Amino acid sequence: MQRSRSQPMPRPLPMQRSQRKPGRTGNTKLSVLSGPVEDPAMNEKPRICLILEGSYPFITGGVSAWVQDIISGLDGIDFVLFTISPQKNQKLRYVLPPNITEHRDLVLGDRESGRRSHNEGRPAVGAILAAHARMFSGAMPNIREMISRIPEGYDLTEDAVVESRYWKLMQRMNEERNPAYPFSDYFWAWQSAHAMLFDALRANPPEADLYHAISTGFAGLAALAASVRRNKPFLLTEHGLYHKEREIEIRKSQYIRGYQRDMWIKAYNRISGICYREADSITALFEENRQKQLELGAAADKCVVIPNGIDIGRFASVVRAPRPGFHVGLVGRIVPIKDIKTFIAVAKIVLDRYSDAEFHAIGPTDEDEGYYEECVALTESLRISDRFHFTGRQNVLEYYSFLDLMLLTSIREAQPLVIMEGWAAGVPSVTTKVGNAPEMVDYDERFLAPSKDAAKLAECVIWIRGHPEEMAEINRANREKAISRYDKKDMLSSYEKLYRRMARPEAGKRRWRA
């Protein structure tokens, strides 16, 4: 895909996070589909297509771990993968379970495989122009009708560029909303945005009984397109809020400016709204995110909460073997979103108070090697490298056996698995106020701090170090909380029932047929 040097295409990234506000009922857990599976048709083996953008199986992290758990834990269901990637030939980071029967990868911006018959695409171009006209007037387009006019696999991008009606539309929008910047800047921003949209809409995922998108965005659009063309249900799951994550990235960008910036933000918001409105069922990890989905147009009767879950037996079986000193761990990738530099700053503050403390950054260092090198240099400049360890990939169970505290310094999270894991193993957590983390720790300020607030995080660490008897009781309560609320068996049972009921033949009798 062409674009100017000054207009880089925002890359699809793993999804995350939105901060929970206090004042709502804490620790909400909604049962999705309770009761035994009684319908004989539900004993058949459904075929579920998972549609993922910028995550599994190419990137490790919470979303990818969740996907791996779903697939490997539901071996009575066949899965096919349709991944949406920023580049070709990415390295697999996971061993694919045997019940994954097919995997197709769509590379955004890859123009090699699309058909380019202008006559074939003329109805699609007209439908898309009509949809734009409705959006600019403040009305919602009939997205299903528009999708039905786009042939599967057909590449709209070239037709859009040469279509005179598109040029007139772009020129008018630039003159009205982007007068301070050159038309060339606006054109490249428009082409980048629409080329990716067209890629998602022309997507050709594997045949399936149900299309399950693990975010809105381009994955959600691809799932919706498959649902329309093949008359199958569309399930949407969000771990964070995709459009909010993209907005944060766009506002930080030095290359996207003026109306171009607003165009990108509005586009992502509209995509999320379309996905919420058109999905047959929507799941969220916690109630705060469910409420935000409702605000963007999701129907309340379609939205349910299914919390994350962990293998309780695996983590609860850890035998605690404390070591001399005070050991603080962070389990996560060494990448900016985890804000390892704030973790290092916390270590410096605590070490100035307790010289016997040790800090362990437990996770892969090869995803952003430049950032990892900066982190190493920071520990050296602060003269704490002898007490701060970058371990690389490790068996976290070994560390849970002796860690005194888990620390999360993330800028964004959804519902952190590492908090649950630590609790089950007997390790408390201090966390930034991201995603569902505040609710998980009952909004207790002894275990919470704003993002990037190293002083407050260090204060929490020091308080925990100084109150061992009180922490012993809190650890027991946390362990019970993990067992009762975050058992992976409950999560898998909920999704199996949801999959089987949505994948039944009568679920395909949709309210709109292409």
Image (spheres, rainbow, N blue to C red):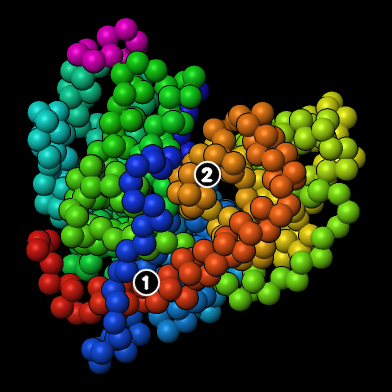
Horizontally, is 209 left or right of 54 in the view?
left
- Residue sitting at x 76%, y 30%: 349
Above or below 145: residue 173: above
Task: Determine which quarter of the picture holds residue 282.
Answer: bottom left
For numbered disc 1, what is the local secondary structure? helix
Q: CA distance from mark 2 to mark 1?
A: 31 Å
Q: Categorize mark 2 by other alpha carbons within 10 Å: few (<14), some (14-19), many (20+).
A: few
Task: Determine which quarter of the picture holds residue 44.
Answer: bottom left
Answer yes or no: is residue 155 visible. no
Q: Quadrant of the N terminus?
A: top left
Expressed as whole percent of the image width and height from the top left, the position of residue 142 reads 11, 46
Chain part drawn in magenta: 175-183
Residue to which mark 1 is pinned: 495
Horizontally, is 5 left or right of 260 in the view?
right
Above or below 466: residue 284: below
Residue to which mark 2 is pinned: 444
User: Is residue 440 magenta-colored?
Assistant: no
Answer yes or no: is residue 353 visible. yes
Expressed as whole percent of the image width and height from the top left, the position of residue 396 reads 71, 61
- Residue sitting at x 46%, y 62%: 308
